[in-house]
Image (cartoon, coloured by chain):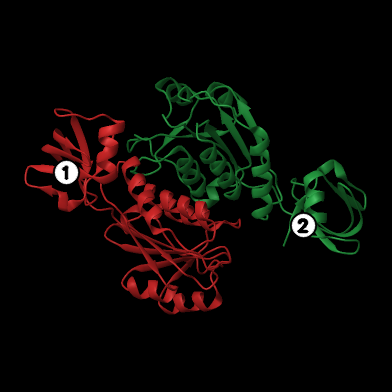
Chain colours: A red, B green
Amino acid sequence: MNVFYVEPKRVAGPQFELSGQEARHAIKVLRLREGDEIFATDGQGTRYTGTVQSTGKDSVVAHITQKEEKPAPDPELVLAMGIIKKRDRLEFAVEKAVELGASKIVLFNSDHTVKTNVRMDRVENIIQSAMKQSMRYWLPEVQLLDSVDEVLDEFENYTVLMAHEKVDAEHQTFDTEQDILKGQKFLLLVGPEGGFSDREVELAENKGAELVSLGEYRLRAETAAVAFLARF
Amino acid sequence: MNVFYVEPKRVAGPQFELSGQEARHAIKVLRLREGDEIFATDGQGTRYTGTVQSTGKDSVVAHITQKEEKPAPDPELVLAMGIIKKRDRLEFAVEKAVELGASKIVLFNSDHTVKTNVRMDRVENIIQSAMKQSMRYWLPEVQLLDSVDEVLDEFENYTVLMAHEKVDAEHQTFDTEQDILKGQKFLLLVGPEGGFSDREVELAENKGAELVSLGEYRLRAETAAVAFLARF
């Protein structure tokens, strides 16, 4: 079943309208025509069932026949990844993050990040596709920040968990028991290839972050991101 | 730090010998020469520290100065994945499986697998690289089997967990409490894009498999594989 993405501003009254790439895919690839059934999500919790009313060059207008709503992901999980050099691995991590329920994705220049240009347009497309593939109705936002300092400030009221290789027993108090988690907001910090710098670890700990070990093996950055989210 | 892979049969007495691609990489890329320090693992639990004695066209002979041993992964985790069509996703899952501690990797033709040729040479290279990258000293074997029936027979004495989307509360009894796991052997079954067929689910359950849900969202096959392993 294909679920399209419709921008919230294009949902008005009894109809919704696909535009751009989504519209073109609906018309040219799936050959949707007047009278056909169509599904779309606004990325803000709602999935619409509609009947195609008209199609134009870059547009599909549908009449809404049904609405299904899903609550926002709970607990709220923000994945913040230090930018890694290899684009395909970064994009892979973003895709998996959406599949595994991340509410927001933050990419930031960490101390050990090798200077890299992030193609945000590609990242946004990946997030949108992953949302549709996973049948999610919430579109995670993605943000680009300049340091872990900025990330910690932006998500000041979140419970901060920082993935760190060497964590002794006394640090490892993180409990993923389901009931405890509801209603909470977590910021999961994952470092780049070189890991976090001592400065970053100290800063995070001073701000109340808990260091979490992701197992006994050394993980690539994108694996750590996925493993972290998979634990919720 | 570079750790090379040395075949167990090339470790004899006081020396080890790299050959093929490993030797060429050592000589041409890293420019190792007589007297240089070199590390190698035999993929069977041991890492050797050595001093290069001689280099040839496709050969590096080193004198062993130190040995470090790590026990085999415990619990033993075998990841069996229904073969998926997209090669990069399959290879990604294999790489992540090694990073996350899989002892063995099985790729099998599941009922919903679209006929695909698996490049086993590539898969073996990926496993070897991932082992070295993760600083693991155990090289996971990889096997290609023809059906989930064969997989279940091959791993008859293992605790079988099958990833399945719709799992109700009474099925979900799987406990990942650390102490309980030591000394056990697990077979983790992950289906291909189309999931497992009813026949496969029934067969597995009849053989004592437990169905495990990997969360509330629909996951791609490679994500399910990673999420499953990340839970241990």
Q: Examine the rendered structure and indicate whether residue A86 appears above or below residue A1.
A: below
Query: How far across and how far down the image is residue A204, in percent?
Result: 45, 75
Mark identifier at residue B29: 2
Q: Can marks 2 and 1 be said to lie on one chain?
A: no
Identity of the residue drawn at 50% across and 49% down: B230
Identity of the residue drawn at 39% across and 59% down: A120
Alpha-carbon span between mark 2 and mark 1: 56 Å
Query: How far across and how far down the image is residue A56, in percent?
Result: 18, 38
Query: How far across and how far down the image is residue A166, in percent?
Result: 58, 66
Q: Dividing the image into 4 quarters, which one contains the N terminus of chain A?
A: top left
Mark identifier at residue B172: none
Amino acid of disc 1: Glu
**Foreground pick, A16 / B225:** A16
Identity of the residue drawn at 37% across and 55% down: A121
Q: Residues within 10 Å of mark 2 (few under 14, many from 20)?
A: few
Find the residue positioned furthest to the front: A57
Label 2 lies in what chain? B
Direction from residue B158 to residue A28 in the image, left or right:
left
Instruction: Find numbered disc 1 in the image and state the secondary structure of the residue it sits on.
Output: strand
Q: Examine the rendered structure and indicate whether residue A148 appears above or below residue B116.
A: below
Query: How far across and how far down the image is residue B161, in percent?
Result: 49, 35
**Foreground pick, A158 / A11:** A11
Mark identifier at residue A17: 1
Instruction: Find numbered disc 2 in the image and state the secondary structure of the residue it sits on.
Output: helix
Identity of the residue drawn at 65% across and 54% down: B133
Tags 2 and 1 in contact by the CB under 8 Å rule? no
Direction from residue B48 to residue B137 in the image, left or right:
left
Label 1 lies in what chain? A
**Foreground pick, A19 / B180:** A19
Amino acid of disc 2: Val
